[in-house]
Amino acid sequence: MKKKLALMLALSLTVGTVLTGCGGASGDAAQTTADNAQTADESDAADTADTANADLVYAVEAGSAGEAAAQDNGFQTNVVASQADALMEVASGTSDAAIIDLLMAGAMIGEGTSYPNMKYTDELTTEEYGVGCRKGSDLASYINSVFSESYADGSMKETATTYGVQEALVEQPASEFTASAEDSDVAYIQDKGTMIVGITDFAPMDYKDASGEWIGFDADMARLVAEKLGVEAQFVEIDWDNKIMELDSKNIDVVWNGMTLTAETTSSMECTNPYCNNAQVIVVPAN
């Protein structure tokens, strides 16, 4: 079909050249034919791309924004426990591509990373990260006040720079802590002496260093909040698909792991102000 359209385009341009002296109408007709041929070619290319996408299997984390993006685009999925597992699926050849967070892609793929032979291609969404607390919890207000203070004094940017996410930071508005008159989560956490943080292994936000300690931008910011509360931060790996249940059952006190602010999370949790920009991207083998 493309050869036929190319021949039609060449013929129309030749006719247009011969007839140029006969008036503008012939030139306009040739241009119209050329435009139609180009449109048809672009349509064919789009159809081919759609077919290719339909044939690929995308590894996605259960309950993630990446899984939602895959569903919105009608992609075939291989649902796994974490974004790190999604990259492993691509590396092993059991999935054709993965859909993960842009910030994770920046830390995990390309030269000098764990997956030097991978690259990301399309950005499927743009989004923002927030921290999730129990619905109605005053902990979200407390975290907002720490965000505001640390952004203003530059310590948030300093921490972000350590992990290479400084360009993704969202400016923080002025915010003061408002305690709940009753059933205060802040008081509950201070009484028990620990703030239990629900996470997954997700560089550069939460991941383990060589000694097995949790580090990352989110981990460091969570420790800062715990320090200001006068308690210890404890990190617990959770099934991301069950994060809301983990919160409501008080197995954890907060979800702090590059969580995309969606209609589901904001309706089911008390969420903080957004603090980082992000996108969902497609990761494929570099070749």
Image: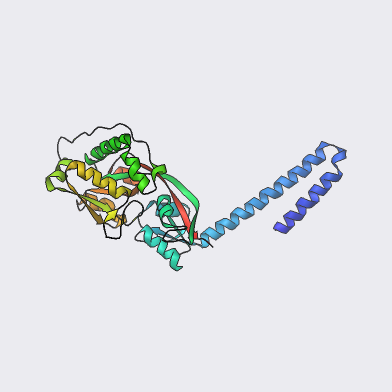
Residue for point 46% across, 52% down: 281
Residue for point 26% across, 46% down: 222
Dividing the image into 4 quarters, which one contains the C terminus? bottom right
Q: In this view, does 48 lie to the left or right of 91?
A: right
For residue 277, above or below residue 115: above
Residue 165 x, y percent position in the rendering: 39, 46
Q: Within the image, what quadrant is residue 131 found in?
A: top left
For residue 259, above or below residue 4: above
Residue 203 x, y percent position in the rendering: 36, 54
Residue 153 x, y percent position in the rendering: 30, 35
Q: How many marks?
A: 0
Q: Is residue 64 left or right of residue 18?
A: left
Q: Is residue 123 visible?
A: yes
Residue 249 x, y percent position in the rendering: 20, 52
- Nearer the observer, 26 or 89: 89
The colour style of the image is rainbow
Q: In this view, does 49 lie to the left or right of 256?
A: right
- Nearer the observer, 161 or 119: 161
Q: Within the image, what quadrant is residue 155 found in?
A: top left
For residue 211, above or below residue 141: below
Residue for point 32% across, 57% down: 201
Q: Is residue 284 left or right of residue 79?
A: right
Dividing the image into 4 quarters, which one contains the N terminus? bottom right
Q: Is residue 79 visible?
A: no
- Nearer the observer, 281 or 34: 281
Residue for point 24% across, 56% down: 236
